[in-house]
Image: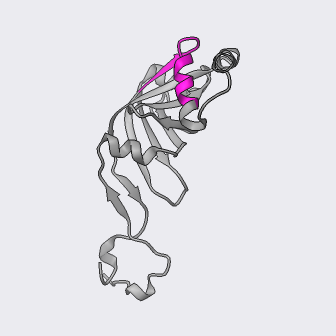
Amino acid sequence: MKKIPRSDRRAQSIATNTSVDLLGLIEFARGRHQFVLATTRRDGRPQLSLVTGVLTDDGQILISTYPQRAKAANIRRNPAVSVLIMGEFDGAWVQVDGDGTVDDMPGAADGFVEYFQAISGEHSDWDEYRQAMADQGKSLIRVHPTRWGPIATGGFPPELFEDA
């Protein structure tokens, strides 16, 4: 296999894989809210959804949705899900596998507060916010992680570089 001289590397990068514990996963996810949620359709094929979410400080993933959406129906039928947590498209990412549940209003109200706080901070009127979630008929997906990682970046295998 031909090696790439370091001088020819330019913007090329070496792929990385970093194993982390739950605290490392939470730290990685802090400030990242662009996720891809994978659920399973009735025919067994994956349903992928671009979602906004949060990994909470206690290790749960929260995602806002509506009860009639495919992702909610799929989770009610089969709770096995995967979530890709990422930032920029060419940045680091991590896959989290777990079990999902769908909480409907009014039971999801406190979860929506936690979701909002993690993404946007404090709200001027929490009762008004809870009522808005109820009026919109929102549901909250909770994913309880069972495994994850490693945190990965794309790039070339290190053995392709002369000085790797």
Residue 12: x %, y % from top left: 46, 75
- Using the image, determine if residue 136 lies above or below residue 10: above
> Which quadrant is home to the N terminus?
bottom left
Q: Is residue 148 visible?
A: no
Reply above or below: 161 against 127: below
Q: The C terminus lies in which quarter of the figure?
A: bottom left
Classify residue 27 as left or right of residue 107: left
Locate residue 72: give its quadrant.
top right
Residue drawn at x 41%, y 25% is: 79
Where in the figure is residue 150, as x and y percent of width and height?
33, 51
Q: Residue at the spot x=58%, y=28% of the render?
A: 64
Query: Taking 10 as reference, is 105 above or below it?
Result: above
Against 150, residue 2 (above or below) is below
Q: Nearer the viewer, residue 20 or 75?
A: 20
Question: Is residue 112 highlighted in magenta?
Answer: yes
Q: Can residue 63 be seen here?
A: yes
> Magenta segment range?
100-116
Q: Count up the numbered dots.
A: 0
Task: From the top left corner, tell me how far across and down residue 81 is, in percent.
Answer: 42, 33
* Depth order, front residue of 107/124: 124
Identify which residue, 17 or 28, lies in the foreground. 28
> Residue 41 location, x and y as percent?
50, 30
User: Residue at the location (53% across, 18% down)?
Assistant: 110
Magenta stretch holds residue 56: no
Q: Quadrant of residue 120?
A: top right
